[in-house]
């Protein structure tokens, strides 16, 4: 069959594939024909060129370039040299005279030509095609379309080789990378000449010049991100001048591309001293004034979406420039040791962005201000001090959470609609912005404490204590955060200042006075925050404690109706404030300790069981006032007596003896309540409430109680808790056993079967969020969302009781320490935590590690380690099995999946859960083997030098036992080194320091044989992939 006939068949097949009227069978046959043609026909490139003539249909031309690209990618090495040259020449021939004008030509065709040429460049340049750049430049005089495609070639080449590398052959990629860098001066010269030419034609609204300039700017944006500064420096002033001249060209969004160019230049990730060159260049008068003038014009028309995108890019540019400046200013050998040119103008623009209604823009400005306030030299400059005063005056309003995209009550809302798809996205950015604002305040407290104090004092006097009913919720939330921070600092710095004491006392008295007349519990709840911020005043006059207790008594003793949600919240807040008063202000409260106890006793009947449990923390903290150990023990015994009696009662002991009995006790074997009234009357719901409340109370007491000074090995709460220790550890077996087959089979259908013991949706969201940064404690389940149904209530209870049991056991082991380990049954009690371990959900396992075993490991000593170690050996072997299987499943799933399809929500969760569990365990692993010590200070260094002393690892008591346990040691080492190979950089970086010490220890103990060494080497090498 001749070439013309083949071409016609190909054209028909292409049309058949893309024609909507084609039958599925016809389309399939056409597709198979095209695929077979690509594989079997050696002249596929020539067929492709016969399809790309500009008089052909667009889809045919597009497919023609796909055939050419395929031939270059997969057939190139099979072609003779003259055939390769013919393909290259044909490409440039079409480029020179086979295209429509720049405005008429379709973007798919342009991309097709660029991809085909880039494919040839990857094969031939620079060795077999040294004149590529010159040949590409020679096409530019033919017209705008030719020049545009040349820049598209440069753009795609840089992306494929450097910024978004997609080449498997690393040697070829390195050769091309070097060739591109050597060609940068030529590419920049061509770019400058083209931009100059376009600039002369844009004034006459030449559409071709506009489109060409846009492509050049897109290419420059890709280059300016990484090109070495020494290659940029010679042409940088002229290049910046040209780019800035396009900041006023709105047609085709060119000004946006120009702004992105400058942003890429300002946000370069390199931190070498040479990077000062682009920073200083951008601060020069011409570019800085052009940028700031563009900001002003863009701000005037920012309601337009394109204009707003332009303004955001300019803001990102200034933000990146400021943070880059901070990283270079004052560093060794850096040319930046003082304010650059136009720095005052820059600061004014940053302030303007901080005032803008858009949260996105304010957040960018706040990032710059945080970097400046944390920089010793910048924060001391007079220009910056003038700006920061204005910023601090704006902080109170900036902290107010307004502008949700779901609302229309302020200017910020219209911008939020452009920036965020949901309120949740807005909340994420607002939280970041608020944290940055708080950081600015903290950084400025030392030098701007008077200004901040006046702001807070005036607000308390005029708003909180002046007209509290007129203060909106967002203002309460914002100012109470600010007032707490400022007043705490002011008191610490001015403890001996009587004028300050009088000021604070006046504010406290005014606040307490207005609280007495407020009947709106929601407003009173906000006033409680203001009052607690003024607790520092009691350090100047302790008698005010009685006034505070009087107001707290009024709130805590108020009867609660079924719909009094505001009062319930106020009571919870009052208990929290009382705990803070007792815990943080010991000396002023000590004379009134009896009054605090009387308050707690009198208000208890008016509180819910959970509120009473929280109140127990106050009493536990109050017990720390006792200097006499027997009195302290007696006080705690009377405080904990109701909880101890409940947990030792026969029904609870019986329920905790077996997982099946436990699910019967909490009602999962019976029909779920259908209404709130039915739930209120249910004995099972009552059981849940009582068990959760008493466990919470016990947890709070153990957390608050401190050992008596000079008395070691005798915890004040041990004697009262000792009888219920078996119950606590039996509960561990029950909450783990919920996931075993027998209890699951007994769950009533009205509870949804297995789903009732699954984690909540908010817990899953927590895991997805935690994969960014794992840290922070807090409850994983309690109170995070309203419980809508009986099933939700039961699921929430399971999460909460698991949390409490985990924390209780961790506290018992770590706080009781020697007393606990001295128990004959200590080892067996701890083994209860490992029953049904294979059934425990990974989410729960993560918190067993964090809340229970990390504290236990941290508290282990030479005499207690032998008792704790057998339990930890079980955990080490289990974690090796779990993590290995989880990561195998993740990797298999990723390798078997379709790269073009996104992971499902469940797949994402499982991968993130595996990452989070790995990181949690890795953070515990050092304690299983080693302890860190500072190198000895033999040379008499000062304190700063001592802080910089290198930490060294030494084998701890648990590590010595581990080294003599072959099976567990193998599991430990296997997990540790496999972490380096798994798809989690955070976990790997945590594991690296321990790996070196582990190898040294294995060598020292003679545990490193050839097989082990090969495995460790394999893992280390695989981690480099």
Image: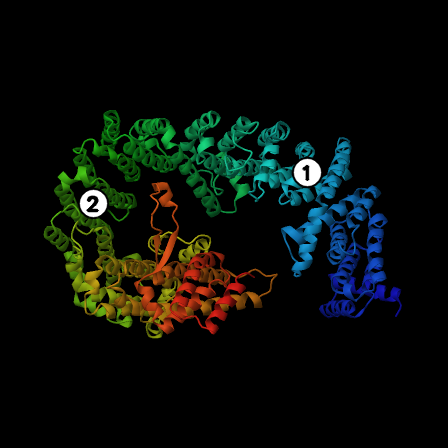
Q: Kindly identify which residue carries mark 1.
A: 254
Horizontally, residue 687 falls left or right of residue 190, namely left
- Count the labels in the image: 2
At which x and y percent is residue 724? Answer: 19, 64
Nearest the viewer among 866 and 754 is 866
Mark 2 / mark 1, whichever is N-terminal: 1
Vertical side of 207 occupied by 41: above or below: below
At which x and y percent is residue 373? Answer: 44, 34
| Residue 671 in view in this figure | no
Quarter occupied by residue 722: bottom left
Q: Which mark is residue 559?
A: 2
Question: SS for tag 1?
Answer: helix
Nearest the viewer among 628 and 773 is 628
Screen quadrant of the C terminus = bottom right
For the residues labelled 2 and 1, the Cα–Cα distance comes to 67 Å
Horizontally, residue 202 falls left or right of residue 910, namely right
Residue closest to the far front: 939
């Amino acid at each position: 069959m001749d070439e013309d006939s083949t071409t016609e068949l190909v054209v028909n097949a292409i049309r058949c594939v893309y024609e909507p009227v084609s039958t599925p069978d016809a389309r399939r046959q056409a597709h198979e024909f095209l695929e077979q043609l690509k594989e079997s026909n050696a002249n596929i490139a020539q067929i492709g060129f016969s399809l790309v003539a500009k008089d052909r249909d667009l889809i045919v031309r597009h497919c023609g370039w796909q055939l050419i690209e395929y031939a270059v990618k997969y057939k190139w090495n099979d072609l003779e040299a003259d055939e390769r040259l013919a393909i290259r020449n044909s490409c440039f021939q079409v480029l020179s005279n086979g295209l429509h004008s720049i405005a008429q030509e379709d973007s798919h065709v342009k991309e097709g030509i660029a991809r085909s040429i880039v494919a040839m460049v990857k094969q031939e340049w620079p060795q077999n095609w040294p004149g590529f750049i010159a040949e590409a430049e020679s096409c530019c005089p033919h017209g705008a379309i030719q020049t545009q495609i040349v820049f598209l070639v440069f753009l795609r080449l840089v992306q494929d080789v450097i910024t978004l590398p997609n080449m498997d052959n690393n040697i070829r990629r390195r050769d091309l990378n070097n060739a591109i860098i050597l060609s940068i001066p030529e590419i920049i010269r061509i770019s400058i000449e083209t931009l100059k030419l376009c600039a002369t034609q844009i004034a006459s609204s030449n559409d071709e010049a506009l489109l060409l300039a846009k492509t050049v700017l897109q290419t420059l944006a890709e280059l300016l991100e990484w090109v070495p500064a020494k290659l940029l420096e010679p042409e940088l002033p002229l290049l910046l001048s040209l780019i800035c001249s396009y900041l006023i060209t709105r047609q085709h969004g060119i000004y946006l591309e120009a702004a992105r160019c400058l942003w890429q230049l300002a946000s370069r990730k390199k931190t070498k001293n040479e990077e000062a060159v682009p920073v200083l260049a951008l601060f020069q008068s011409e570019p800085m004034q052009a940028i700031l003038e563009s900001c002003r014009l863009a701000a005037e028309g920012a309601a337009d979406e394109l204009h707003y995108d332009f303004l955001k890019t300019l803001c990102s540019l200034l933000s990146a420039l400021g943070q880059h400046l901070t990283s270079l200013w004052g560093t060794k050998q850096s040319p930046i040791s003082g304010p650059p040119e136009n720095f005052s103008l820059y600061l004014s623009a940053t302030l303007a962005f901080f005032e803008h209604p858009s949260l996105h823009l304010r957040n960018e400005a706040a990032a710059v201000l945080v970097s400046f306030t944390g920089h010793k030299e910048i924060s001391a400059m007079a220009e910056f001090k003038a700006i920061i005063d204005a910023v601090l005056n704006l902080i109170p309003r900036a902290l107010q959470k307004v502008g949700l995209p779901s609302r229309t009550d302020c200017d910020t809302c219209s911008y939020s609609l452009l920036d965020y798809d949901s309120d949740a996205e807005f909340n994420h950015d607002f939280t970041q912005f608020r944290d940055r604002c708080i950081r600015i305040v903290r950084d400025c407290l030392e030098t701007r404490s008077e200004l901040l104090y006046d702001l807070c004092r005036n607000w308390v006097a005029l708003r909180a204590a002046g007209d509290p009913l007129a203060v909106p919720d967002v203002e309460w939330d914002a100012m109470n955060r600010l007032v707490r921070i400022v007043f705490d600092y002011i008191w610490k710095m001015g403890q001996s200042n009587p004028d300050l004491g009088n000021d604070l006392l006046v504010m406290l008295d005014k606040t307490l006075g207005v609280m007495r007349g407020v009947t709106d519990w929601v407003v009173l709840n906000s006033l409680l925050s203001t009052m607690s911020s003024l607790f520092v005043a009691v350090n100047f006059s302790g008698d005010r404690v009685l006034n505070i207790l009087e107001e707290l008594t009024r709130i805590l003793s108020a009867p609660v109706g079924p719909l009094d949600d505001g009062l319930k919240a106020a009571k919870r807040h009052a208990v929290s404030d009382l705990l803070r008063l007792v815990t943080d202000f010991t000396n002023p409260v000590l004379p009134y300790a009896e009054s605090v106890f009387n308050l707690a006793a009198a208000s208890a009947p008016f509180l819910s069981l959970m509120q009473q449990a929280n109140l127990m923390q106050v009493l536990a903290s109050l017990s720390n006032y006792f200097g006499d150990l027997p009195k302290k023990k007696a006080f705690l015994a009377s405080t904990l007596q109701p909880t101890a009696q409940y947990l030792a009662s026969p029904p609870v002991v019986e329920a905790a003896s077996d997982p099946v009995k436990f699910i019967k006790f909490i009602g999962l074997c019976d029909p779920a309540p259908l209404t709130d009234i039915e739930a209120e009357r249910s004995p099972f719901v009552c059981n849940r409430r009582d068990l959760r409340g008493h466990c919470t109370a016990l947890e709070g007491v153990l957390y608050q109680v401190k050992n008596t000074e000079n008395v070691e090995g005798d915890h004040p709460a041990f004697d009262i808790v000792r009888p219920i220790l078996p119950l606590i550890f039996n509960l561990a077996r029950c909450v783990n056993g919920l996931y075993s087959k027998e209890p699951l089979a007994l769950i009533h259908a009205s509870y949804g079967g297995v789903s009732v013991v699954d984690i909540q949706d908010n817990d899953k969201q927590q895991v997805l969020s935690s994969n960014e940064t794992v840290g922070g404690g807090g409850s994983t389940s309690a109170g995070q969302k309203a419980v809508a149904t009986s099933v939700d209530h039961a699921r929430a209870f399971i999460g909460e009781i698991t949390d409490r049991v985990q924390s209780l056991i961790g506290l018992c082991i770590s706080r009781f320490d020697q007393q606990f380990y001295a128990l004959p049954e200590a080892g067996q009690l701890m083994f209860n935590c490992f029953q049904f371990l294979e059934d425990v959900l990974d989410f729960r396992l993560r918190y067993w590690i964090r809340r229970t075993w990390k504290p236990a490991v941290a508290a282990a000593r030479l005499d207690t380690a032998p008792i704790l170690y057998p339990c930890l050996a079980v955990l080490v072997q289990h974690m090796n099995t779990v993590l290995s299987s989880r990561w195998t499943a993740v990797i298999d799933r990723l390798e078997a999946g379709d790269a073009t399809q996104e992971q499902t929500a469940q797949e994402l969760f499982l991968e993130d859960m595996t990452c989070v569990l790995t990181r949690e365990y890795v953070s515990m692993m050092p304690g299983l083997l080693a302890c860190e010590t500072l190198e000895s200070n033999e040379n008499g260094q000062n304190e700063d030098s001592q802080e910089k002393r290198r930490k060294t690892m030494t084998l701890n008591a648990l590590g010595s036992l581990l080294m003599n346990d072959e099976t567990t040691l193998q599991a430990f080492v296997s997990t540790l080194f496999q972490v380096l190979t798994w798809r989690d950089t955070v976990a790997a970086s945590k594991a690296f320091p321990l790996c070196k010490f582990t190898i040294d220890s294995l060598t020292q103990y003679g545990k490193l044989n050839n097989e082990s060494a090969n495995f460790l080497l394999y893992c280390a090498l695989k981690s480099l992939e």
